Image (cartoon, coloured by chain):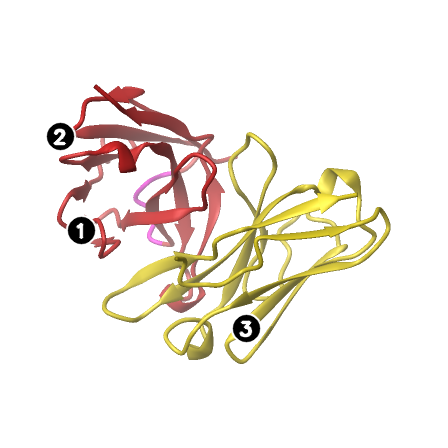
Chain colours: A red, B yellow
């Protein structure tokens, strides 16, 4: 049974960098059928896709966040970290990591497993 | 403003049938990309409910069904139960500008 777990600071100061890590258990991050994703949800609002990474390091980012976001993979630890720079209060959200099933291409891909989420508050 | 449009809320009595719509554009649903649905119970992470327009993952009751036509998709829930009260999100791939994935704004289902 695949398990994803987000970890990192729950409070980040404005203008600083938000850093979270997703640890994957019960499956290998190097499985070529999957990408690995970050998705966020501001309090009381809907879901926003942040970006995805493949085990080779290939990434795709939300155009609205591209200039500030980096997602990478650490295969030795079976983890994929998220970095979001120059944060503001608008970045306050629950951050989820998830697995993207991509066996038949992007057009048919979906998020089949999610972590429990980590609340990150941006405040001084 | 979400790329995929859903009604903010729907409601129904126990035992009834409700539907939730999801309207996209020619760069996502209308481009023949699959639509997927997620259920988010209060205080929990989203869970995959329907994938590939019509398919249910193992463990999802057959009371939940999905359909797609043109630039729209729908989620139907029959035999409504109190435990179905949740937020529901549609999702698709979008090829405008660059490769990216989009969600609907979410629909809050209230079981009266």
Residue B66 position in % (x across, y down):
64, 64
Range of residues picked out in magenta: A28-32
Whether residue A115 sits left or right of residue B111 in the image: it is left
User: In the rendered view of the protein, which quadrant contains the N terminus of chain B?
Assistant: bottom left
Q: Find the distance from the CA under tag 3 to the CA under tag 1.
A: 28 Å
For numbered disc 2, what is the local secondary structure? loop
Q: Chain of mark 2?
A: A
* Residue B98 appears in the rendering: yes
Q: Which residue is mark 3?
A: B72
Q: Is residue B53 covered in magenta?
A: no
Which chain does the numbered disc 1 sit on? A
> Considering only order in the chain, which callout, 1 or 2, is on the residue closer to the N terminus?
2
Give the quarter of the image for residue A45.
top left
Nearest to the observer: residue B32 or residue B76: B76
Mark 1 = which residue?
Answer: A66
| Residue A31 among magenta residues | yes
Of residues A79 and A115, the one drawn nearer to the viewer in this rendering: A115
Q: CB of mark 3 within 8 Å of CB of mark 1?
A: no
């Amino acid at each position: 049974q695949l398990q994803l777990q987000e970890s990192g600071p729950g409070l980040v100061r404005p203008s600083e960098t938000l850093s979270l890590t997703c640890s994957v258990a019960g499956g290998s991050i190097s499985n070529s059928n999957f990408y690995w994703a970050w998705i966020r949800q501001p309090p009381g609002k809907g879901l926003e896709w942040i970006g995805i990474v493949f085990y080779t390091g290939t990434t795709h980012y939300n155009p609205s966040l591209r200039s500030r976001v980096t997602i990478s993979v650490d295969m030795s630890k079976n983890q994929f970290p998220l970095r979001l720079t120059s944060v503001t209060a608008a970045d306050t959200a629950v951050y989820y990591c998830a697995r993207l099933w991509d066996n038949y291409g992007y057009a048919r891909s979906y998020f089949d497993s999610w972590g429990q989420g980590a609340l990150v508050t941006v405040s001084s | 403003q979400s790329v995929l449009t859903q009604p903010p809320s729907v409601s129904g009595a126990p035992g009834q049938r409700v539907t939730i719509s999801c309207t996209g554009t020619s760069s996502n649903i209308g481009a023949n990309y699959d639509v997927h649905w997620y259920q988010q119970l209060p205080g929990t992470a989203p869970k995959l409910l329907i994938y590939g327009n019509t398919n249910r993952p193992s463990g999802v009751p057959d009371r939940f069904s999905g359909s797609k036509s043109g630039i729209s998709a729908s989620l139907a829930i029959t035999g409504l139960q109190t435990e179905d009260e949740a937020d529901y999100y549609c999702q698709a791939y979008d090829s405008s500008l660059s490769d990216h994935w989009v969600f609907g704004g979410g629909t809050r289902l209230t079981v009266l």
